[in-house]
Image (tube, rainbow, N blue to C red):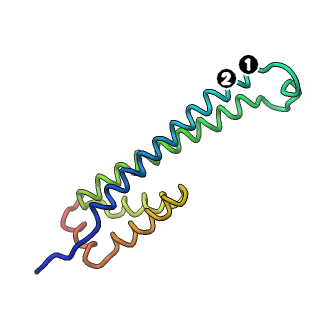
Amino acid sequence: METQPNNLNTFKILMVIKGVFNLLAALFFAGYGFFVSMIFTNINQGELENAPFDVGTFLGVFSGIGFVVMLVFAILTFMAAKYLGETRKHTFITVVSILNCFTGILGILLGIFTLIEINKPHVKPLFNKNPA
């Protein structure tokens, strides 16, 4: 029985790259929250005094949530890349591929093509050979 080629190693590398991009996005949110909050706390004049809520706090909370979400996406993507290399945890890779579809055009492409690859008839049995 000859083995058919698959692209799992290619998708593993692409998942690692996507995880790095997610980490960079998390750092962007952290830096954005820090600098914008610092700017708005230093401005105590003009129309900001009459604002119905504290703009600096709002942007700080928004960027904090963005940081946590992107950090979780990065960790999940790195774990999926690891499992792709080990050809195990098919369901986890499926879920992470679907979640990646919510992170922009690169995530959509990576998620869809990963789903197509891991559900091919000759690739799916590879995951059954290596149980979790």
Query: Label 1 vs label 2: CA separation?
Result: 6 Å
In the rendered image, the vertical position of residue 31 relative to residue 127, given as above or below: above
Task: Assign the C terminus to one quadrant of the image.
Answer: bottom left
Q: Residue at x 48, y 41 (%)?
A: 24
Instruction: Check whether the beta carbons of the residues at disc 1 and disc 2 lie within 8 A of each other.
Output: yes
Task: Assign the N terminus to one quadrant of the image.
Answer: bottom left
Based on the displayed image, in which of its 4 quarters is residue 64 positioned? top right
Q: Residues within 10 Å of mark 2 (few under 14, many from 20)?
A: some
**Residue type highlighted by circle 1:** Asn
Give the residue at the far left of this rendering: 1
Which residue bears the numbered disc 1? 42
Q: Residue at x 50, y 63 (%)?
A: 108
Q: Residue at x 12, y 79 (%)?
A: 2
**Callout 2: helix, strand or loop?**
helix
Q: Which mark is residue 38?
A: 2
What is the x, y in percent for residue 48?
Answer: 84, 27
Q: Residue at x 72, y 21 (%)?
A: 41
Based on the displayed image, in which of its 4 quarters is residue 127 positioned? bottom left
**Callout 1: helix, strand or loop?**
helix
Q: Which mark is residue 102?
A: none
What is the x, y in percent for residue 42?
Answer: 73, 18
**Residue type highlighted by circle 2:** Met
Count of marks overlaid on the render? 2
Q: Is residue 105 left or right of residue 113?
A: right
In the rendered image, the vertical position of residue 121 relative to residue 71, given as above or below: below
